[in-house]
Image (cartoon, helix red, strand yellow):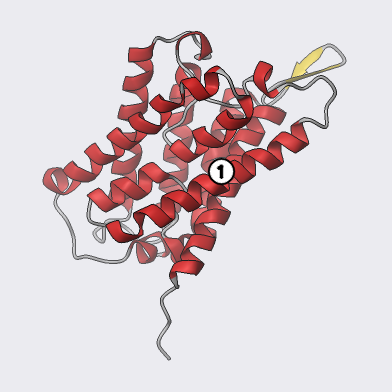
Amino acid sequence: MAVQSPTLRQRLAAEFLGTFVLVFGGCGAAVLAAMFLKDRTQLGIGFMGVGLAFGLTVLTMVYAVGHISGGHFNPAVTIGLAMGRRFAWADVAAYVVTQVVAAIAAAAVLFVVANGKDGFSAKDSGFASNGYGDRSPGGYNLLACIIIEVVLTAVFLFVILGVTDTRAPKGFAPIAIGLALTLIHLISIPVTNTSVNPARSIGPALFAGGDAIVQLWLFILAPVAGALAAGATYAFLFGEGPAAPLEQATSG
């Protein structure tokens, strides 16, 4: 009996779940576990732990639902794949809206959890939002933050396009994609708190408010620009194998 292709509703459900877990898991690690004080001792998972949290959420969720939706969980990925002719432009809007709604839902749940601790303030803590200038964790200026977000999103898309190429070894794409996102976070958390994903940026910023929202434009435009650049140039630089659905590439 032939296997039926997932419906658009099923694909959007997979994107919602994957994006929700990505934002709740990655931003949750940053908000709840990156650092805290107990008995005057600072404990926590630090930058390394947060980077791994983002990478592991992508790895596990691409294995879990990538065979249904392609495992984008990121508007920049969806747009970049469409530019690279790996995804239908007709479905881009539905994917992007679903991803943004899922990210906001995840941030809302995280906000409720974080407020379970006396004295918590999303605005004062930053709530894992992204920023430049005085909101950059390392104090990096606007130009540096634009460059890091454009370049690293392009790198992320090159990895995704490469490991899902029909010429690549099958079944390993989620591992490579998750490790790539971990590496990206280890490089850029001190610069922008790492976006490379407009949905991931929008969700926490809405709850942090203030300057987090004012600066949100960069973390929408820069990742999309990097993704478009990678999508437009991958085939020119590296060629293309025979066409195959992204869902097959992520599931092996």
Vertically, is 126 above or below 6? above
Q: Residue at (43%, 10%) from the top-left corner?
A: 140
Q: Amino acid at mark 1?
A: Ala
Vertically, is 199 above or below 119? below
| Front one among 39 and 78 | 78
Label 1 element class: helix
| Front one among 35 and 82 | 82
Q: Could you tell me residue 63's position as x and y percent?
A: 51, 58
Which quadrant of the rendered structure holds the C terminus? bottom left
Q: Could you tell me residue 199's position as x and y percent?
A: 48, 40
User: Mark 1 — residue?
Assistant: 103
Q: Residue at (31%, 66%) from the top-left corner?
A: 245
Q: Residue furthest bottom?
A: 1
Vertically, is 89 above or below 184? below
Which quadrant of the rendered structure holds the N terminus? bottom left
Visible residue check, residue 120: yes
State left or right for residue 15 relative to residue 24: left
> Within the image, what quadrant is residue 196 found in?
top left
Q: Residue at (67%, 16%) from the top-left corner?
A: 124
State left or right for residue 64 relative to residue 143: right
Q: Could you tell me residue 248's position as x and y percent?
A: 37, 66
Visible residue check, residue 72: no
Q: Residue at (50%, 56%) from the top-left corner?
A: 15
Q: Residues within 10 Å of mark 1 (few under 14, many from 20)?
A: many
State left or right for residue 153 relative to residue 117: left
Count of marks, rendered view? 1
> Within the image, what quadrant is residue 220 found in?
top left
| Front one among 120 and 3 | 120
| Front one among 15 and 217 | 217
